[in-house]
Image: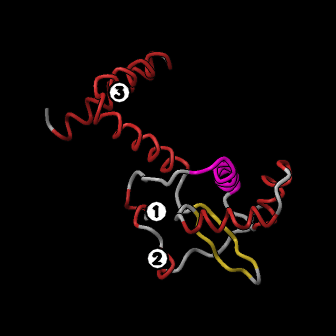
């Protein structure tokens, strides 16, 4: 069972990058390596953990040392993707952003870049993806477009 650390203090929240704040909406996340993604996926799944637990879940199966996992956790903290609390002599790490925020940020970054150069291709790809997912997803996309038009005007 994951350790439930205390919630971050107001001071800790102020020092995190602005894009990790709950009101920031979709995240513009930093690029991550394979190990960083694995660590984030583990912490999104379990909620929080100390370096030894993350190492047992992510590092040991890959033959990666505890020291490397600790360095990775520290880097993710410095990038603003993890929050941490000191409990006794150890840090307990937890995601500072949800998996959904992170994924939406990655997709948003890609789409922004593509819209600048190939807007028609991006829109066509979204329709194709929704259609391949099934009629329910295509209908959902139509509802999202209609709701956005209603909110923002024609």
Say whether marks 1 and 3 touch (CB < 8 Å): no
Which is nearer the eye, 90 or 111?
Answer: 111
Residue at x-position 40% and y-position 44%:
109
Earlier sequence position, callout 1 versus callout 3: 1
Q: Is residue 1 left or right of residue 44?
A: right
1 vs 3, front mark:
3
Q: Residues within 10 Å of mark 1 (few under 14, many from 20)?
A: many
SS at badge 3: helix
Quadrant where the C terminus sits is top left
Instruction: Tell whether 29 sits left or right of 54.
Output: left
Q: Between residue 106 and residue 116, name the one nearer to us.
A: 116
Secondary structure state at the residue bearing disc 2: helix
- Looking at the rendered image, the quarter that the N terminus falls into is bottom right
How many angstroms separate mark 1 from mark 3 (CA)?
Answer: 27 Å
Name the residue that disc number 2 marks: 15
**Residue 25 point in image, percent of width and height:** 38, 54
Q: Which residues are magenta?
A: 32-46
Left or right, 21 with respect to 94, comes to left
Seen as rendered, the residue at the extreme left is 154
Q: Residue furthest front?
A: 117
Mark 3 touches mark 2? (CB < 8 Å): no
Up-down: is 141 above or below 13? above
Residue 57 image position (x, y, % from top left): 80, 53
Q: What colour-coding does the image apply?
A: secondary structure
Distance from disc 1 to disc 2, alpha carbons, whole Å, reads 10 Å
Q: Which mark is residue 122?
A: 3
Quick check: 113 above or below 62?
above
Q: Secondary structure at mark 1?
A: helix
**Which residue is under mark 1?**
20
For the point 30% across and 34% down, the residue is: 115
Task: Categorize mark 3 by other alpha carbons within 10 Å: few (<14), some (14-19), many (20+).
Answer: some
């Amino acid at each position: 069972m994951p350790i439930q650390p205390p919630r971050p203090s107001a001071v800790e929240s102020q020092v995190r990058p602005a894009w990790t704040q709950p009101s920031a909406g979709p995240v513009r996340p930093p690029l991550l390596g394979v190990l960083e993604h694995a660590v984030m996926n583990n912490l999104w799944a379990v909620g929080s953990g100390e370096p030894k637990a993350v190492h047992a879940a992510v590092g040991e199966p890959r033959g990666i040392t505890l020291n490397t996992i600790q360095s990775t956790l520290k880097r993710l903290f410095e990038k603003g993707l993890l929050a941490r609390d000191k409990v006794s002599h150890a840090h307990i790490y937890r995601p500072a952003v949800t998996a959904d925020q992170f994924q939406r940020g990655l997709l948003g970054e890609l789409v922004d870049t593509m819209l600048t150069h190939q807007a028609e291709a991006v829109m066509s790809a979204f329709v194709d993806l929704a259609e391949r997912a099934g009629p329910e997803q295509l209908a959902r996309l139509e509802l999202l477009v209609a709701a956005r038009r209603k909110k923002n005007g024609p």
